[in-house]
Amino acid sequence: MRLFLAINFPHAVRREIASATAPLRECAPELGWTAQDRLHLTLKFLGEQTESRVDALAAALATTAIRHHELNMSVGGIGAFPNFRRARVVWMGVNPEPRLELLHHDIEVAFEAVGCELEGRAFRPHLTLARVRDALDVERMRSLWRAAKRIDYTTEFIVRSVELMQSDLSSSGPAYTTLVSAPLRST
């Protein structure tokens, strides 16, 4: 089973993001755009895991989540990794939030204790909008960058839970299934 931990966005926020970023999809329809119903923030990729490990992973998530309060998340601004000239991923930013950083840190520690590898790079929270499968020419990337600069969208919502998700890959894109939803402590 291919698993990851995520913060799933409310349906209304997903709709708003899809609407706000429509000019990007029109500008570069050949990119691998994330479907509206799959928009989320990945906290930790767990990779291939056996079904027998799901209970231990769910317990680690539940124990960690309940120690953290619900938090406000603010998203907005468009960017690309590593940059728009050599983009591999087009993303929407997540504004820095100390409580999100602490939640991520505690998840890393808890999941290392149950045998998952620590992430080797810094946590850069973002919402993946698209993956660039084949490099676009310079002018197309400039056009995409200009379109991204014109998008003036931000929103804020309350994060109430963290989910253990299963990803099933297919030729039509990944299908995500929520295996466990671990609530954060209400404020």
Image (spheres, rainbow, N blue to C red):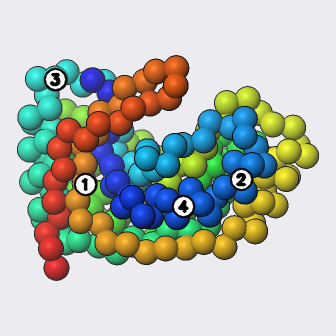
SS of the residue under disc 1: strand
- Disc 3/disc 4 C-alpha distance (Å): 33 Å
Residue indicated by mark 3: 51
SS of the residue under disc 3: helix
- Disc 4/disc 1 C-alpha distance (Å): 20 Å
Residue 111, position as x, y percentages in the image: 21, 42
- Disc 2/disc 3 C-alpha distance (Å): 38 Å
Q: Is residue 34 above or below residue 54?
A: below
Looking at the rendering, which quadrant does residue 165 occupy?
A: top left
Residue indicated by mark 2: 24
SS of the residue under disc 2: helix
- Disc 1/disc 3 C-alpha distance (Å): 19 Å
| Amino acid bearing label 1 | Val
Residue 113 visible in the shown view:
no
Location of the N terminus (image quadrant): top left
Q: Which disc is residue 17 wearing?
A: 4
Q: Which disc is residue 162 wearing?
A: 1
Specify which label sits upstream in the sequence, 2 or 4. Answer: 4
Q: In this view, does 103 lie above or below 99?
A: above
Specify which label sits upstream in the sequence, 1 or 2. Answer: 2
Specify which label sits upstream in the sequence, 2 or 3. Answer: 2
Q: Which of 49 and 168 is in front in this view?
A: 168
Residue 173, position as x, y percentages in the image: 50, 29
Q: In this view, does 34 lie to the left or right of 68?
A: right
Question: Is there a contact, CB below 8 Å, between mark 1 and mark 2?
Answer: no
